[in-house]
Image (cartoon, rainbow, N blue to C red):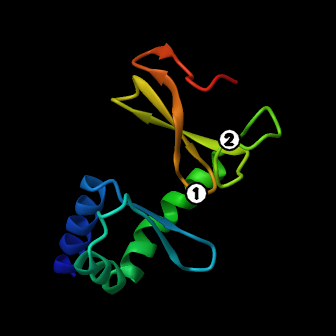
């Protein structure tokens, strides 16, 4: 069991280092959002092998984020996936807040940067 946990941790660390986002969906699939050229065949194979463990690890976070999703004050989409809701995620020990799409998890903007409200896109 320890090997599975450490292998999963290493796989998640590699994905994080290469800006690869792993997003579980309601159908039990794992959506992989990776910059071009970062998803090698070897890494893809490891993701397939660890799919069940990845889904089990990521699903509770997704459910928590969905419960805390904040609806956008306007009806227009806030993300290119068409979502109108977002999730604010505290970063930098709570000094900054990153705004991510509640549907696909894609980065939208920074709502606060080191204590200063700084939405770049405007609301």
Q: Is residue 16 placed above or below 46 in the rendered structure?
A: above
Q: In the drawing, does residue 87 fall left or right of residue 85? A: left
- Expressed as whole percent of the image width and height from the top left, the position of residue 100 reads 54, 43
User: Real-space Cα distance between discs 1 and 2?
Assistant: 11 Å
Looking at this view, name the residue that lies furthest to the front.
36
| Residue at position x 36%, y 61% in the image | 36
Q: Are marks 1 and 2 in contact (CB under 8 Å)?
A: no
Element marked by disc 2:
loop
Element marked by disc 1:
loop
Residue highlighted by disc 1 = 104
Dot 1 crowding, Cα within 10 Å, few <14, some 14–19, many 20+: many
- Expressed as whole percent of the image width and height from the top left, the position of residue 83 reads 70, 50
Dot 2 crowding, Cα within 10 Å, few <14, some 14–19, many 20+: many
- Expressed as whole percent of the image width and height from the top left, the position of residue 40 reads 26, 73
Q: Is residue 71 placed above or below 34 in the rendered structure?
A: above
Instruction: Report which quarter residue 95 is drawn in.
Output: top left
| Residue at position x 34%, y 29% in the image | 93
For marks 1 and 2, the one nearer the N-term is 2
Residue 78: which numbered mark, if any?
2
Image quarter of the C terminus: top right
- Expressed as whole percent of the image width and height from the top left, the position of residue 106 reads 52, 50
| Residue at position x 78%, y 32% in the image | 73
Q: In the drawing, does residue 73 fall left or right of residue 4? A: right
Image quarter of the N terminus: bottom left
Looking at this view, name the residue that lies furthest to the top.
116
Q: Is residue 16 placed above or below 68 in the rendered structure?
A: below
Q: Is residue 45 placed above or below 84 in the rendered structure?
A: below
């Amino acid at each position: 069991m320890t090997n599975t946990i450490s292998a999963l941790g290493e796989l998640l660390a590699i994905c994080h280092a290469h800006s690869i986002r792993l997003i579980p969906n309601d159908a039990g699939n794992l959506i992989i959002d990776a910059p071009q050229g970062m998803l090698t065949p070897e890494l893809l194979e490891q993701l397939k092998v660890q799919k069940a463990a990845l889904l089990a690890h990521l699903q509770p976070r997704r459910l928590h984020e969905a419960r805390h999703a904040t609806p956008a004050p306007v009806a227009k989409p806030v993300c290119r996936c068409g979502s109108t809701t977002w999730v604010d995620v505290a970063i930098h020990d709570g000094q900054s807040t990153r705004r991510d799409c509640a549907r696909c998890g894609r980065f939208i903007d920074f709502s606060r940067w080191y204590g200063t409200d700084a939405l770049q896109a405007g609301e």
